[in-house]
Image (spheres, rainbow, N blue to C red):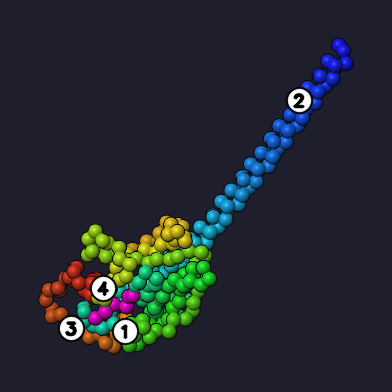
Amino acid sequence: MNSTTRDRHAGFALIESIAVLALAALVFVTLLIATDLVSRNSQATARRADIIETLMTGLGAARRDLQGARYIRVGSQAEDPVLFSGSSKAVAIAVADDNTGLGHGESLVLIEARYEEGRGFLVRSSARLLPGTRGFGAVEFTNQAVLVQGPWKYQFSYADPEAGAERWRSAWTATTRMPAAIRLEVMDASGGRVVPPLTVQVAIDSGGCSEATRVDCAPEEPKAEGEQQTPPDPENPGDRNGQ
């Protein structure tokens, strides 16, 4: 083998070595990129899990309040309004206890959406149900607590069993009855749901007048012995549970 042939083989060997090194470098870079992507996906999954856990904890607190909503009229007549107010941004209800440990008994709870610097806050506050209360306009809510916060929007809606196909309403305007259910949605900036909506059936556990307004309620006249009791009218929520 002459020197020219040896030089040619040496050149090919050098080119092959460079190609192998380049391929190895490419594989190494690909592995680095893949590892980084897996790490980022893992971190993103962990962050989303933390976000969902935080959201579900806050929504769980809202659920407990909404499940405790009570049917309370501000007077003794069936046409008197009920202590309930609902809009797309807030809901106000009467409850047996505001769960603050203050022993207020019958109370009012407000859950509302607030927004500041691109962040949404779901805030809960409460107030004692005072004698003569006939609505929420003059109520001074205290004991504020943030249930949920983040770059989200919150929307309430209300199920009306008398509305036919248009069951869910963005505001509750019926003053003498309560909705069948309350739904709370948490949405991102594009309007997509962050988590499944919280839907709470309104389980009315009492009726008539509240303790704070009971002075306005005329006591029921005792029935004469043997007189048949009139069953409650299912179309009239004021008569629910024989109230």
Which residue occupies 47% across, 61% down? 189
- Relative to residue 133, is residue 51 depicted above or below? above
Q: Secondary structure at mark 3?
A: loop
Q: What kind of residue is marked 1?
A: Arg
Q: Nearer the viewer, residue 42 or 77?
A: 42
In three-dimensional space, the C-alpha distance between marks 4 and 2, rounded to whole angstroms, equals 83 Å
Marks counted in the figure total 4
Image quadrant holding the N terminus, namely: top right
Residue 18 vs 35, above or below: the answer is above
Identify the mark nearer the N-term, 4 or 2. 2
Q: Position of residue 37 (x, y in %)?
A: 62, 45
> Which is the main secondary structure of the residues drawn in magenta?
loop
Mark 2, Cα crowd under 10 Å, few <14 / some 14-19 / many 20+, is: few
**Near-viewer residue (58 or 47):** 47
Labelled disc at residue 200: none
- Check disc 1 and report the residue beneath it: 134
**Residue matched to label 2:** 16
Highlighted magenta segment, given as a residue range = 80-85
Q: Is residue 92 above or below residue 12?
A: below
Give the spatial CA distance, label 1 vs label 4.
15 Å
- Residue 65 image-quadrant placement: bottom left
Label 3 belongs to which residue? 221
Q: Nearer the viewer, mark 1 or mark 4?
A: 4
Q: Nearer the viewer, mark 3 or mark 4?
A: 4
Under tag 4, what secondary structure?
loop
Q: CA distance from mark 1 to mark 2?
A: 90 Å
Q: Which residue is identified by label 4?
A: 174
Quarter of the image where the C terminus is located: bottom left
Q: From the viewer's perspective, tell me whether residue 193 is left or right of residue 20.
A: left
